[in-house]
Amino acid sequence: MNRLLGILLLVLAGDATAQERFDLLITGGTILDGTGAPGFTGDVAIRNGRILQISRDRLSAANAGRVIDASGLVVAPGFIDLHAHIEGLSRMPDAESHVRQGVTLAVGGPDGGGPSPFGPYLSRLDSLPLGMNVAFMTGHNTIRRAVLGMADRKPSPEELARMQQMVAAAMGEGAFGLSTGLFYLPGTFAKTDEVIALSKVAADSGGFYTSHLRKEGLGLLDGVAEAIEIGRQAGIPVVLTHHKAIGPAMWGKTAVTLAMIDSARLAGIDVMADQYPYTATSTGLGALVPPWASEGGDSAFARRERDPVLRDSLVRGIVFNLEHDRGGGDLRRVQFAHVTWNRTLEGRTLHDWVVEQQLEPTTTNGANLVIEGMLKGGASMVYHVLDEGDVERIMRHPMVAIASDGGLSRPGVGVPHPRAYGTFPRVLGVYARERQVLPLEEAVRKMTSLPAARLGLADRGWLAQGLVADITIFDPTTVKDLATFQSPHQYPVGIPYVIVNGVPVVDAGVFTPNRPGKVIRRPARRG
């Protein structure tokens, strides 16, 4: 009897030991759990892609298949990028420029540009070897273009119903919400009631609404008010994406827009924002062109440009934008990022191009070259038109997440905005450590639990037992971006480990061949 009892105890002890075994042990790091709470020294055990245990006491390394010594490092949830241009996943599924920043989940389909048809697109991504997790919004511009083309008119009841059906289908296939780019074509032709009608469909499925505002320079306050009103009438949570104030005339107005967010929240409207930590925007050359000129598409633009009367109006419209909006009143603020028809312009400015053409650097001459560039196919641009005071004011607001608005990038291709390589480490190194704009714990919260909550994710964005093991480990004393506007193709420093679904993708500073990323679909709405 005693022998049988001894055997039973040995079996039970062996079973308990087996239960405590883990694939990966992260030991001795300062754990910031993503909630904004103070850090503590502890260990994190991972098994089968999830966090098995978090302990303030040392866990046994004998039970671990692999041990990472995180002494002197911060162990944080993987960073979640609420606004990412990841259309290039089929060409760059490793997403190295994002993963090296500590990003373990990026949300694509912003600015109204979500994929279509939605479900098949996600199914194709399922087969790719992804370096990070990805999720997607469905896009208003994509849907409107499919139904109305580039027409500047209201949809008929039948057309609106078709658009609503497309939103509903995408939500059913895993979209996290509806994105709009009311600054862009053809979204700029939509009236507010159209957007409300589509947002109600997304709200019915538990989604949220994210908006590139109709105006971010002159008209910014009206743009914010419109987004808040959409949230109120549609009953949908709102993100004012890449929030900013463009042009000297609007600098400082973020004090008003942030007060508008606070007032809306007090009134029960769930509004927040996201932001990238730079004083320049990036979008197409067409941002300088008045929308009416492109109604009907590129060929319509070319026809209007050939009409002397319309061309005169077109030049005046571009001059206005150069002086009062994206141009910031100085052709030197308008920088070329990627130009397929003239690679020598990349990294240089509109002022440089005007001078190269042996013209006076006036806004009128600049406008004429903008038209020439549009006729050649346009270009990707960087506009140096933001104020550092606004950047810091927005960053301090508790309901502002960090998001890159960056595209997937490969070294040597164009001269992109440095946010593609440096957004998250720049906040940690420059704004948290060097300038002390916000505490490190708060910076991490803005990159993790805050965006996770907006996405409605309960299984990632925090460090807690049972959650998915998306983890970023960084050195708080050295983490920093290296990418600049002149030399953007530089990976950051101070992020030695990025773990996606329990698997290291960046390991001791080396970008590995591991590709554990998954396509994340919106969880079914509860009750």
Image (tube, rainbow, N blue to C red):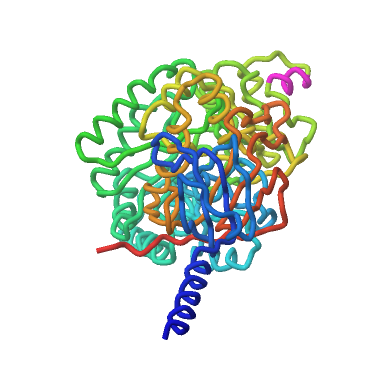
Q: Is residue 186 visible?
A: no
**Considering only vertical position in the picture, is 310 above or below 352?**
below
Q: Is residue 135 left or right of residue 66?
A: left
| Position in image of residue 491 (x %, y %) | 69, 37
Along the viewing direction, whichever of 178 and 266 lies nearer the viewer: 266
Q: Is residue 113 left or right of residue 478?
A: left
| Position in image of residue 306 (x %, y %) | 63, 36
The verdict on residue 356 being magenta is: yes
Task: State the predominant SS element of the stretch in magenta.
Answer: helix
**Considering only vertical position in the picture, is 501 above or below 236?**
below
Residue occupying image coordinates x 56% and y 54%: 60
Q: Is residue 331 left or right of residue 148?
A: right
**Considering only vertical position in the picture, is 253 above or below 451?**
above
Along the viewing direction, whichever of 526 and 313 lies nearer the viewer: 526
Along the viewing direction, whichever of 336 and 502 lies nearer the viewer: 502
Residue occupying image coordinates x 74% and y 31%: 346
Q: Residue furthest front?
A: 2
| Position in image of residue 375 (x %, y %) | 67, 39
The verdict on residue 458 being magenta is: no
Q: Is residue 253 left or right of residue 433?
A: left
| The magenta segment | 351-357
Q: Is residue 347 visible?
A: yes
Quadrant for the C terminus in the image: bottom left
| Position in image of residue 169 (x %, y %) | 40, 66
Number of marks in the image? 0
> Which quadrant holds residue 473?
top right
Quadrant for the N terminus in the image: bottom left
